[in-house]
Image (cartoon, helix red, strand yellow):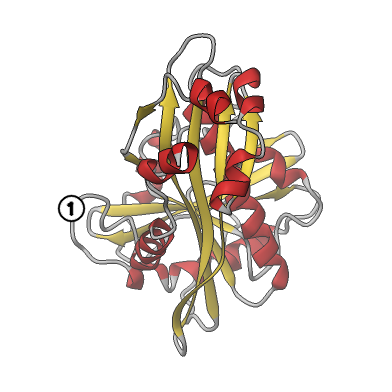
Amino acid sequence: MASKLSEFLRTASFDVREVERQEYVDIVDYTEGRVKVLDEDVIQEESFEGAIYFIDGKVRHLLYSRNFDRSYLISQVVVGALRWSSDEGCKPEDVKTFLVITGDPRTVKAAENFFDDTLGIDVRMLPSSVPELTQTVLALMALEEYSLSLALAKRMDGLVIKDGSLKPIFEAKVKGAFFPGSGPLGLVKNIWDSPQQEIASNLVRDLSVGERSRAFLIEYGEIVYVSSYLRIAERAFLRMDVAGRKDEIEFEDVFALFNRAASIIPEMTLEYYHRRYPENILPIRSLEEYLSAYFLSPQEIMAAVYY
């Protein structure tokens, strides 16, 4: 076993950079069809009551080999939720973590079952021929985030907010992908990095802090995405997304959800223009810090192999 694993890792190199989760593919790129602004949107102020579940994930790439015929990547993914309420404050829950081994199918097969026994952590084997292996890992993390978001929204005991857009898009095809009053709702920070920039400019131009824009939508076959921009600071905006089957979503329920979220989200940030603030609101930042505590180091992976 030792010699087999030594061969498996003979081209490995450390990559200790922590890769912040990123919008590597913006599913809501609005390139199919035409964006429709919903004139029937009802925007009104509301006072927020109840709980919010924030969902996020983080990834750290631990070992990487660029060998052209035996390429592989070992990463760790952590996905979890933070429950917030005005009465109880913040409490993390539903956290799970696992190693992801992706790359050449023969190489992935050689490592099967080893890390699970050695480190006591779940392992996902993902044979992949994609040259950029980090994309495979990020796609898996996005799926786990969305699945957790749907599971929490199904409880109907709080508003569910997922950091980033709702992807992968095929998850929205399932029956019951949207729950009135719960969501899930995607919260997108980089609203200018998308083809609908001109529409964004028109919709946010006259918004005051704490106000949201009229909703707009686009259809992807049987799936509909409904979005609204929210001004959270003088120079900061977020986009709220809802996705689901168009035969199940009622626009009135979506408008009410946007109103509810808009009444509380601006209060959860600091008007501090540095790094990812103010768009990275405080509960999500707290969740990111908590999830980071689960990360292993590349040295721990190497120790598991050689000792």
Horizontal and vertical percent position of residue 238: 39, 53
In the picture, measured across the screen, residue 284 lies left or right of residue 3, that is left
Residue 30 is at least partly visible in this image: no
Residue drawn at (81%, 52%) of the image: 175
Residue type, mark 1 in image: His
Residue drawn at (35%, 38%) of the image: 192
In the picture, measured across the screen, residue 110 lies left or right of residue 269, that is right
Task: Locate residue 12: give its quadrant.
Answer: top left
> 23 or 104, which is in the foreground?
104
- In the displayed structure, would residue 107 be above or below residue 292? above
Quadrant housing the C terminus = top left
Horizontal and vertical percent position of residue 172: 70, 46
- In the displayed structure, would residue 192 be above or below residue 10? below
Find numbered disc 1 in the image and state the secondary structure of the residue it sits on: loop
In the picture, measured across the screen, residue 231 lies left or right of residue 174, that is left
> 300 or 47, which is in the foreground?
300
Residue drawn at (75%, 47%) of the image: 246
The residue under label 1 is 274
Horizontal and vertical percent position of residue 154: 72, 66
Task: Locate residue 36: give its quadrant.
Answer: top right
- In the displayed structure, would residue 75 be above or below residue 232? above
Quadrant housing the N terminus = top right
Disc 1 crowd rating (10 Å Cα; few below 14, some 14-19, many 20+) is few
